[in-house]
Image: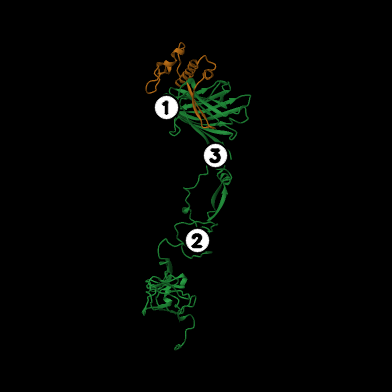
Chain colours: A orange, B green
Amino acid sequence: MKKKVYDVATGKTEILDWTAEEIASHHIGYASIAEKNTAYKLEKIKNLRLQKLRDIPADYDSSKYDELLNRDTDGNLTHSVWSKP
Amino acid sequence: MAYIGKSIESGTFAVLDTSGNTYNGSNTTFSLGTQVGSPAQLLVSHDGVIQKAGTDYSLASGGTQITFSTAPASGASIFIVEISGAVGGPLDSDLNGSELILDADGDTSITADTDDQIDIKVAGTDQITIKDGALSPVTDNDIDLGTSSLEFKDAFFDGTVTTDGLTVSGTPSFADGSIAIADLDIDGGTDIGADIADADLFIIDDGAGGTNRKTTASRIKSYVGGGGLVPITTVAFSSGTELVINNCFSATYLNYMMIISLLVPSSDASLNFRFNVGGTVDSGSNYRYTLAGTQNSSSGTTSQSNGTTDEGRLFYDIDADSEAGASGVFYIHNPYGAFQRKQIHGNTMLQKGTASNTTQYQVATDYHNSTTKNFTGINLFSSGATNWRAGSTSGGYGRVSIFGIVNS
């Protein structure tokens, strides 16, 4: 994970790696960035559920999130739960 | 012998006394015993043969000596008669085209052998010709008028003065309106080398009446309203996770505009932000955000922070399609100023999910801390450490532009 740092005052640009402290600052409240990503996926699934007025089966835990968010090459969601009844 | 008729009234007409001259076949120059202005003023007899002025003899030593082209032989019989024209004496004669020789060696003269034309010769070369209506040099680009130390005084011309160059050491004066704007060449000028300041001057045609006046930049600023956007920086995203822009906020401006153009993540992601002070990011739980969107399918989409969190949000769920991209305009209120609350709001558009999708969001995100912060920079990063596609400042994609907003 890299960051580009540009200083307007000096015109200097640096490409730096995130320090461990910076990595930690990007998953505050979560055990890891992966766990934070899981929460982000859940947010997207909740949005889709509201848009498409679908219920998600209660037994769909985080292991199913990628499957629920999978899209085909045209960008369409592929999971059957999003299909019209 | 006495004169028949009226005698000469001025000048000299006499046989010169050359008795002191010795002719030996080698000497060519001899004293005249007087001074004459021109060889033609002499009648020279050499062994009974009249000599031709300028050919057989000439003057030397300022007209006090005669120089023969061929040295007179020993015992030669020579007499010289000065005829009229004493040096400096008046010339009362019709030359009828004859050359009037002026100097001692006979190479400087005035002549009018061409009708209605006067030629002035100096040092054997015609220099100036005077004709009816024209005073001209004989040779183009050859004669100076005055010198750097011997200048004419005033000059007056009623017509057009044409010159290859003009150096004015004093202050020129032109009639109002006599210099056309097309004649001003500013290409070779020196750039001001700095931003235009209030005191800088411009030329303005007062009332479009042809009277030029000066005006300060501050007057122009007042006329156009004063407010505006001042570019601070444009930076492209790299292929990394985060773009940090330091020292883009200061006390100079209260509010800022930020334009993010055609930003694409390597996988679907949101763009979040944090403020920083001197590069030290504020990751405290001081941010909130709400993004309310509508897709072109009419379905709604939202993203909220549900209370305070450690990062604000500018874009939600940008599609990774390389042909897509997210763009938005944001107003940043008072990031540096002495207020506890900093606010960003704006409008974004992006592709979500499919290429046929266009989604717009109204974005409102703020920072609130009981301790006042003077933020000087902003960190823009993806949710979940997703990389961005590298952008280009010149290509206009994957870049951020920040402007300071001038109120007046």
Q: In the rendered image, which quarter is residue B108 located in?
A: bottom left
Of callouts 2 and 1, which one flags the residue occurring earlier in the amino acid sequence? 2
Amino acid residing under circle 1: Asn
Of callouts 2 and 3, which one flags the residue occurring earlier in the amino acid sequence? 2
Q: Nearer the viewer, residue B146 or A78?
A: B146
What secondary structure is found at the residue carrying circle 2? loop
Closest to the camera, between mark 2 and mark 1, is 2
Residue B147: numbered disc = 2
Residue B212: x percent and y percent?
A: 54, 54
Amino acid residing under circle 3: Gly
Q: Nearer the viewer, residue B234 or A5?
A: A5
Q: Chain of mark 1?
A: B
| Dot 2 and dot 3 residues touching (CB under 8 Å) | no
| Dot 1 and dot 3 residues touching (CB under 8 Å) | no
Does residue B132 appear in the picture of this structure? no
Answer yes or no: are tags 1 and 3 on the same subunit.
yes
Determine whether A28 is above or below B234 in the image. above
Q: Residues within 10 Å of mark 2 (few under 14, many from 20)?
A: few
Q: Chain of mark 3?
A: B
Report the residue marked by disc 1.
B357
Q: Nearer the viewer, residue B224 or B217?
A: B217
Report the residue marked by disc 3.
B228
